[in-house]
Image (spheres, rainbow, N blue to C red):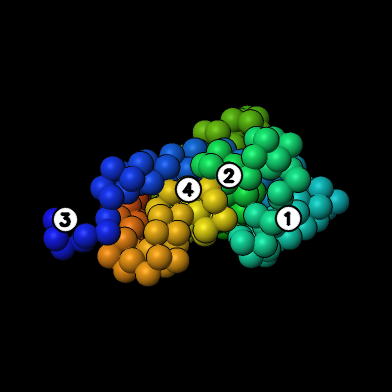
Amino acid sequence: MSNLFPNVEWDVMLTSTGQTLYMTAVAVIATFVIGLFLGLALFLTGKGNLWENKFFHVITAAIVNIFRSIPFIILIILLIPFTLFLVGSMLGANAALPALIIGAAPFYARMVEIALREVDKGVIEAAKSMGSSNTQIIFKVLIPESLPALISGITVTSIALVGYTAMAGVVGAGGLGDRAFLDGFQRTQNDVTFVATVIILIIVFLIQFIGDTITRRLDKR
């Protein structure tokens, strides 16, 4: 293996893989929670829904659209003051988390809204006629009925986050992107770039496989 990839330091590559997995895992969990909240807010305050509120819906939609539209590398730069206040540094895996979460949560929120729109209105009306409260409708009808789409959405978002971590690595966040850029590209060590890329692809394939498996098991159709 050392003859095939002479410039690869496997212990360093293992550490970088751990950093990428750490950034992705924390960001996915936070994105799921925040994105679900934002998506529910978008859906529920929309026209004809449980908590219809045009003003709140417009404000929430504007926030989601703005942050969803900013290119990630620019978002990192814009969030430097916030990141320094929160983490105290722009270097390391933790410093990448604010940008990762703020960049991905609005993206997932739109997926949540789309998933909730697909829930049969008849099921919601039936729950209302049985005397269910809005809270019961949300947690016992809307979320369970849309769960396969929600899992599919967070799978797509997780894969996007792996790509975001690679970009964050270029500006000092660590991880496989950092390894591919600093050791691979800047030092013209193509084998390092290749190995980092292959590991990222493996992570992406694993996320897709796990997400697809869970979605199939939850889908009642």
Q: Quadrant of residue 12?
A: top left
Look at 53% across and 42% down and name the residue there. Answer: 92
Q: Quick check: marks 4 and 2 in contact, CB under 8 Å?
A: yes
110 and 26: which one is in front?
Answer: 26
Q: Quick check: marks 2 and 1 in contact, CB under 8 Å?
A: no
Q: Residues within 10 Å of mark 1 (few under 14, many from 20)?
A: few
Give above or below for 20 relative to 192.
above
Look at 55% across and 38% down and name the residue there. Answer: 94
Of the image marks 1 and 4, the number of the one nearer the N terminus: 1
Does residue 216 appear to the left or right of 69 in the view shown? left
Residue picked out by circle 4: 174
- Residue 139, how many percent across, how many down? 55, 33
Residue picked out by circle 2: 91
Of the image marks 4 and 2, the number of the one nearer the N terminus: 2
Residue picked out by circle 1: 78
Residue picked out by circle 3: 2
Of the image marks 2 and 1, the number of the one nearer the N terminus: 1
Of the image marks 4 and 3, the number of the one nearer the N terminus: 3
Foreground mark, 3 or 1, reads: 3
Look at 45% across and 59% down and name the residue there. Answer: 182
Foreground mark, 1 or 4, reads: 4
Of the image marks 3 and 2, the number of the one nearer the N terminus: 3
Amino acid type at image mark 3: Ser
Amino acid type at image mark 4: Gly
- Residue 131, how many percent across, how many down? 63, 30
Q: Quick check: marks 3 and 2 in contact, CB under 8 Å?
A: no
- Residue 170, how many percent across, how many down? 52, 58
Foreground mark, 4 or 3, reads: 3
* Secondary element at image label 4: loop
